Image (cartoon, rainbow, N blue to C red):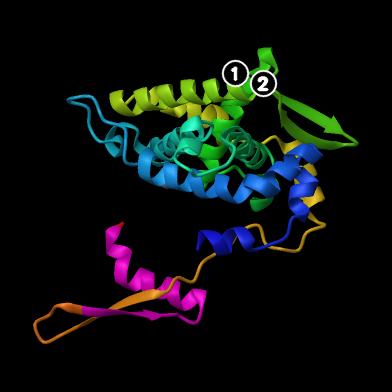
């Protein structure tokens, strides 16, 4: 699925929204691996980690409507922090851990500050939990790194770009924000979660948004991709033991979504 996802669509948007040729070349070389590893680290190391302090309730009770975006942000930050690390090369996952990390940081900031805005309409707030967290993570590190010019806002011929000047400092900032989001989760600090999400994640710079949408008019591919997943059907023998798994491919997205909601809606 990840492979198909990263091969869908062209590179037109990359050229439009990336700051320079180096960034584009790096993305072409390391983008796929960076994306795969961020997903893996996010899901496996990110969501699987993060203990609560003794006596503190579940985030759904303590952080309420902010619990989900806080958890997604924390998982992203675990991934980002460990994506620029020699360990990844030691493990044989890349031939250049530094370039891989730089690529991961470029694409995260580019998306969080700019390209994800093509998914929403002018005047709307960001609402989807992942999009909200990608913005609060990006906007927070942008602001905290301002004095050191860690990430620079560049306007060239009326087009806005965010260019990373200092990747190691940016990694430190991701680390600081990871520590803070973990603290918020562990202590159930609702006020801090609210300040972070409302302060950095929801509101959109209207001028930038209009510009980004205008630039996007040149591209016809939709800003979202959806998946039609295969269905795994076990076959059992007389004793009820699984003997084989058959793969069925549903015909349409709609059919699959309706069957998911029919079968699994009780989970929510
Ligand atoms: Zn997640």
Asked if the stretch drawn in magenta spans residue 261, the answer is yes
Is 229 colored magenta in this rendering? no
Tag nearer the camera, 2 or 1? 2
Alpha carbon of mark 2 to alpha carbon of mark 1: how far? 9 Å
> Residue placed at 49% from the left, 82% from the top?
251
Mark linked to residue 173: none
Q: Residue at x 46, y 33 (%)?
A: 87
Are the residues flagged by discs 2 and 1 in contact, CB closer than 8 Å? yes
Q: Secondary structure at mark 2?
A: loop
Foreground residue, 252 or 206?
Answer: 252
Q: Is residue 268 above or below residue 122?
A: below
Farthest residue, direction right: 157
Give the left or right position of residue 104, taking residue 28 as reference.
left
Would you name the residue on which mark 1 appears?
Answer: 144
Magenta region: 243-267
**In terms of image quadrants, where is residue 139?**
top right
Residue 230 percent across, percent down from the top left: 42, 74
46, above or below 144, in the image: below
Q: Nearer the viewer, residue 172 or 205?
A: 172
Residue to which mark 2 is pinned:
150
Give how far across and how far down residue 260 sits, in percent.
37, 70
Front in this rendered view, residue 255 or 10: 10
Extreme residue toward the top, this view: 147
Q: Is residue 122 above or below residue 77?
A: below
Is 260 positioned to the left or the right of 102 in the image? left
Instruction: Of the two numbered discs 2 and 1 on the same chain, state the one appearing first in sequence.
Output: 1
Q: Nearer the viewer, residue 61 or 107?
A: 107
Examine the rendering and report whether any part of residue 47 can be seen.
yes
Residue 167 horizontal/vertical position (percent): 63, 25
Circle 1 residues within 10 Å: few <14, some 14–19, many ≥20: some
């Amino acid at each position: 699925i990840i492979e198909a996802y990263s091969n869908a669509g062209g590179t037109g948007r990359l050229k439009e929204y990336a700051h320079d040729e180096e960034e584009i070349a790096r993305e072409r070389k390391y983008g796929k691996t960076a994306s795969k590893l961020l997903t893996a680290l996010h899901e496996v190391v990110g969501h699987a980690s993060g203990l609560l302090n003794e006596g503190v309730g579940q985030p759904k009770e303590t952080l309420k409507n902010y619990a989900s975006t806080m958890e997604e942000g924390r998982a992203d930050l675990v991934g980002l922090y460990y994506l620029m690390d020699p360990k990844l090369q030691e493990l044989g996952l890349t031939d250049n851990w530094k370039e891989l990390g730089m690529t991961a940081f470029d694409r995260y900031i580019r998306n969080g500050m700019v390209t994800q805005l093509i998914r929403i309409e002018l005047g709307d707030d960001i609402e989807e939990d992942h999009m909200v967290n990608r913005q609060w993570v990006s906007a927070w590190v942008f602001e905290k790194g301002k004095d050191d010019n860690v990430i620079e806002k560049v306007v060239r011929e009326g087009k806005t770009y965010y260019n990373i000047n200092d990747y190691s400092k940016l990694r430190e900032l991701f680390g600081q924000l990871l520590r803070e989001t973990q603290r918020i989760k562990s202590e159930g600090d609702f006020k801090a979660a609210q300040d972070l999400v409302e302060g950095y994640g929801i509101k959109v710079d209207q001028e930038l948004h209009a510009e980004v949408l205008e630039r996007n008019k040149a591209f016809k591919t939709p800003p979202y991709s959806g998946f039609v997943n295969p269905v795994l059907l076990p076959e059992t023998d007389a004793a009820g033991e699984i003997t084989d798994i058959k793969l069925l491919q549903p015909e349409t997205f709609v059919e699959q979504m309706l069957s998911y909601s029919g079968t699994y809606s009780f989970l929510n």
